[in-house]
Amino acid sequence: MNGHLDAYQSLAETVDRDEPRWAFGSSVTASGIVDTPVEIMMPVPTGAVPGDLAGYCQMLGDDALVCGHRVSEWVSNAPELEEEVALANIALDLLGQARALLARGGFVEGAGRDEDALAFWRDQAQFRNVALAELSDRLDFAHAVARLLVFSSWRFAIMRRLRNSTDPAIAAVAVTAGKELAYHRDYAVRWTLRLGDGTEESHRRMQAALDAVWPYVEELFRTSELERRLIQVGVAIDPSETRTEVSAVLDEVLAAATLSRPAVLAVGTLAGRGGRQGVHTEALGHLLAEMQSLARQHPGATW
């Protein structure tokens, strides 16, 4: 397929599941304290503005954190125990990516905020994730599959390119995240095929789920000004360059699943601003209220 990984070839590749789940390994000491990975404390790459790098790490970290929380909502709600375990592992993968990226962003920012502070003590307008990550699936399994299919296909393409980032922390996360996302995409593809080419009812629900998430696909390929600046110094990649690869993968999967590419209008921006600029759907506010509740009710609590 000219210049990108064939979906089924990639899905057939063996992923070494014995490797550490965290981007840098767990590194737990005898005292139970996790050592700070050396990549997180590396100097800012030449030519990059610290504030831009911190913002970019927060973008990538927020995507993983928010989508991971959505996936975690399926624990105890999935149709089978095996699916709960699979979805829990996917959520943990995304949480690991978020931890490393937000830790790097907090260190570069220099304001004394770690990954916990960035996750639990920012308000909705301070998050920089794409809207697709935050959408509520209303506990409709087909919606969860549709979101994961699009999100993992896109993030896999992003991370595959970020392996060459001039920022060592981003590059290290990208290497491990690529392997994890290959599994996430494999999981979503298999369920898309099963539901799309299954019964009349499963086909209808899978198509309806795609119709619901598709308006938020276009945002994935918009390039922010912050990204443009970091592209110039080799830190970031241009998300618009992943469009051909992601579209080809999705088209291949939808055709095999007897599903149609939705013909729906894309969600626009508000005065040119979207998720990357802190403009979100109502769903994110409800998600953060739940995700941040314990930390805000019991500041500084440990267990």
Image: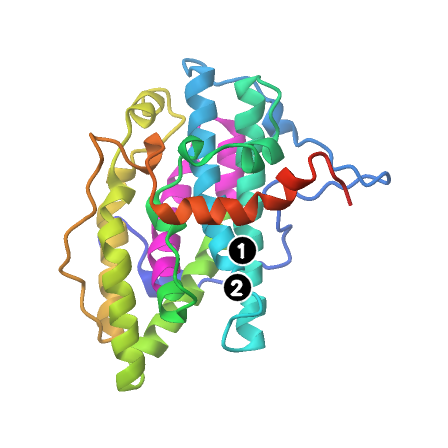
Instruction: Identify the residue at horizontal 40%, vertical 44% (top origin).
Output: 160
Relative to 270, residue 248 above or below: below
**Amino acid type, mark 1:** Ala
Image coords of residue 4 (percent x, y): 29, 51
Image coords of residue 41 (percent x, y): 61, 23
Image coords of residue 225 (percent x, y): 28, 24
**Amino acid type, mark 2:** Leu
The residue singled out by tag 2 in the image is: 87
Question: Which residue appears farthest toward the right when viewing the image?
Answer: 30
- Residue 147 colored magenta? yes
In the image: residue 62, left or right of residue 232: right
Question: Which residue appears farthest toward the bottom when viewing the image?
Answer: 199
Q: Quadrant of the N terminus?
A: bottom left
Per the rendering, the mark at residue 91 is 1
Sort mark 2 into few (<14), some (14-19) or many (20+) by Cα contacts within 10 Å.
many
Relative to 121, residue 217 above or below: below
Sort mark 1 into few (<14), some (14-19) or many (20+) by Cα contacts within 10 Å.
many
User: Is label 1 in contact with label 2 (beta carbons under 8 Å)?
Assistant: yes
Relative to 50, residue 79 above or below: below
In the image: residue 40, left or right of residue 247: right
- Residue 48 colored magenta? no
In the image: residue 261, left or right of residue 57: left
How far apart are the alpha carbons under marks 1 and 2? Answer: 6 Å
Instruction: Identify the residue at horizontal 33%, vertical 74% (top origin).
Output: 193
Of 239 and 280, nearer the camera is 280
- Magenta extent: 146-175
Provide the major secondary structure of the magenta segment.
Answer: helix
